[in-house]
């Protein structure tokens, strides 16, 4: 999804609630229709407080594991689960599932940022 500010996301949501079609919003903001539908559902369930502006999100390992297990063990859909947990996109959950399977059914928490430099010789 194209990066939008918090205000633009609210504007998209309000225009949709006023009757603007998904196709019109897609053309106006340069977003995919699926992204707009996801944004609308996310705000419907969690309200405007779920929207953050420009910062990367990090999620605790316990939340990741709960979401992954809900999809894999209970058979819930990825989209519905991502909305339930307030994830920024379905892609995040899809990547967690792929990584979970690849790492032998373990959630791996990646360290963020640049690795420290080694000692000077």
Image: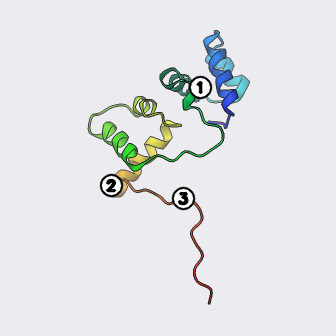
**Distance in Å between CA atoms under marks 3 and 2:** 18 Å
Quadrant including the N terminus: top right
- Identity of the residue drawn at 53% across and 37% down: 88
Mark 3 or 2, which is nearer the eye? Answer: 3
Q: Nearer the viewer, residue 5 or 89?
A: 5
Name the spot of residue 94 as percent of width and height, x first: 44, 42
Q: Which residue is mark 3?
A: 112
Residue 5 figure quarter = top right
Mark nearer the N terminus (2 vs 1): 1
Q: Which residue is mark 2?
A: 106
Q: Which residue is mark 1?
A: 36
Mark nearer the N terminus (3 vs 2): 2
Residue 84 figure quarter = top left
Relative to 57, is 8 above or below?
above
Name the spot of residue 30 as percent of width and height, x first: 70, 30
Q: Nearer the viewer, residue 24 or 14?
A: 14
Quadrant including the C terminus: bottom right
């Amino acid at each position: 999804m194209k990066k939008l500010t918090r205000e633009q996301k609210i504007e998209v949501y309000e225009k949709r609630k006023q009757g603007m079609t998904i196709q019109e919003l897609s053309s106006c903001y340069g977003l995919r229709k699926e992204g707009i539908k996801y944004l609308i559902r996310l705000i419907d369930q969690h309200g405007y407080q779920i929207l953050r502006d420009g910062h990367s999100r990090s999620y605790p390992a316990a939340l990741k594991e709960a979401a992954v297990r809900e999809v894999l063990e209970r058979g819930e859909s990825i989209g519905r689960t991502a909305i339930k947990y307030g994830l920024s996109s379905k892609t995040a959950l899809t990547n967690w599932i792929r990584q979970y399977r690849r790492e032998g059914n373990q959630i791996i928490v990646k360290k963020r940022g640049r690795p420290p430099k080694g000692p000077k010789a």
